[in-house]
Image: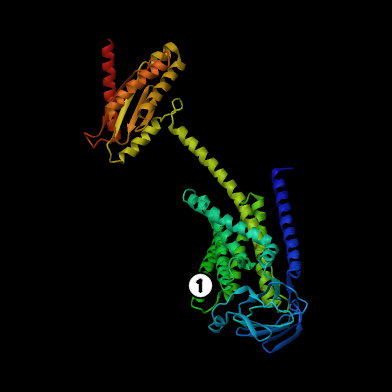
Amino acid sequence: MSKKNKEILISIFVTILVFGFIFVYYDATKNSNTANTSHSYRLNANWEIFLDGHNYENADLDVVVPKQRKNRSVLSMVTTIPEDVDIKNPVLKIYTVNSGYEVYCDYNTLIKHYGILNVATRRIVGSGYSYINLPDDYAGKTLRIRLYVNEDNAFTSITPPEIYDGNYLIRDFVMENIFEIAVNLFLFVFGMSVLPISLYYSTVNKKFIKLVFVSFFSIFISLWSICEYDIITLFTYNIEVKPYLEYISMCLWALFVLLYFKEGIKDAPIFMKGLFWFTLFSQIIYMIVSAVLQIFNIVHFPKMLFGEHIIVILICLNMIIDTVYGIRSHKHKNKVIVIGLIVFISITVSDVVRFNFEKYVFTDQVFNYISLMYIGALFFVMIQITDFCKDISVAISDDMRKSALKEMAYKDPLTQIGNRRKCDEEFTKLDASNKVVGIICFDLNNLKKTNDIEGHEKGDLLIRSFAEVLDKTFGKGGLVCRMGGDEFTVIFPNMKGIDIDKLFDNLKENIQKKNEDVPGLNISTAYGFCDNSVNREWKSMDVYKEADKRMYEHKMSMKMQRM
């Protein structure tokens, strides 16, 4: 079987596994919602409900759907707590949606109220769980709850209240939502950990900008999902916080998942670019408009949710078109990436459509919406990180190869010091400098004689040994280069602080030591030094020519002394 076919089979298997898990988990979650524990009692039956002139007697909250269509409605619901309920440390757990409330025990004894002033002044109320302490003698008493609705279509069903043992309340909530908590905390911690690293490296390599977007996406979709599953209850009991965090995080994760695909439209057809920029500007403008309307208390975030869902569908459309275009143009070579995109898009579209149908179309059914988007997000993030790591490893390999080729182009292969090309490049840089430049030219004596008599191996040893001496003597403040054959050059980009006479004394000592350490080695050199301190109009090449001239004069002088 070919490698390509293996990748496709693995992708199909992973997809089936993910969707199988989703459906099994969804079914199990639905069933668990109706399960009672020994630590709680679910008050779902025998309610009398009064809403907008409609009365519902002996209502079962798992079945009955109150007809609430407009804001400013007041829903009153009454039941009698059975005598045989025996829950210790009783806490009433109720779930409200965009509504203030009053809770009475023994019919007229007010034990908790929330959001009444917000409703009166038309300010946002929020949604989520509230926990209300009940008196110890609650059994057999009348429980009355009044909901003051603050938004149109605030709810299509009522979540049955529960009496809970306060000692087990948080523990049971965590156990019931352990998978959601684990996944979303992982997404959040992952995003927060990777974000600073990716931000730093994105200034060095533009490829890391995609990792920045993935990090932001991971953070904000985890925050959105934490609100969606009311995991935020573990961090705050203030339900007014939830609509702000939920809506803003949804807008931001949608924005960053769209930005992730920005790079892919560079060479795309004009219609793809147009759709992308239209969606991007729509998202940004809608976020700004939503914030302004909320700040001035004109329209609250929950009312803006439908419009944001339309933009999310547009974003998914962008992702679908980008994926199809990538496949057709052979840009998406990794089949697992394509599968990952399909999984995330499918779950996202399914969630958005399902939510709006259950809330606005099937209003005669109990609202039982459970989002699975965080599972798609986890799959999307992990697939993208895997692909990104692969891209980065390829990019690093390319950079290392380019660096090695560049190093080879500027290094002398025999001595591993700079070559003539490196020297010429340095001359060009020095001409743009305003500093005093110094250059020493060297000629290695007796190289031809060594090659002719003792062989080229001994000649290469002589060249390498001399290069080592030069690098040891001048390497800290200067650039040592081999110009070719027996010619060497040392360039000082800045003569400030350089004691050239002391360096020449060190050179003589180092040559003597090297000759002593290597038997039969006889390093001898002629040199000439020049800098442009006398004539600042001189270019680097002028300094080099003068140094070369002085080196030649020194060489002639050494020959005369031997005669």
Residue 206 x %, y %? 50, 51
Q: Quadrant of the N terminus?
A: top right
Question: What is the three-letter code of the residue carrying label 1?
Answer: Ala
Observer-nearest of 192 and 345: 192
Displayed quadrant of residue 344: bottom right
Observer-nearest of 401 and 178: 178
Displayed quadrant of residue 109: bottom right
Q: Residue furthest top?
A: 563
Q: Is residue 381 visible?
A: yes
- Residue 173 sits above or below residue 420 on the image: below
Residue 438 x %, y %? 29, 32
Q: How is the image coloured?
A: rainbow
Residue 484 x %, y %? 39, 25
For disc 1, the neighbor class at 10 Å (few under 14, some 14 to 19, many from 20) is: some
Q: Quadrant of the C terminus?
A: top left
- Residue 539 sits above or below residue 522 on the image: below
Displayed quadrant of residue 516: top left
Q: Which residue is mark 1?
A: 291
Q: Residue furthest left?
A: 534
Relative to 439, 226 lies left or right: right
Instruction: Indicate the secondary structure of the residue bearing disc 1.
Output: helix
Residue 320 x %, y %? 63, 60
- Residue 65 sits above or below residue 474 on the image: below
- Residue at 63 percent across and 68 percent down: it is 230
- Residue 138 sits above or below residue 482 on the image: below
Number of on-image labels: 1
Observer-nearest of 551 and 59: 59
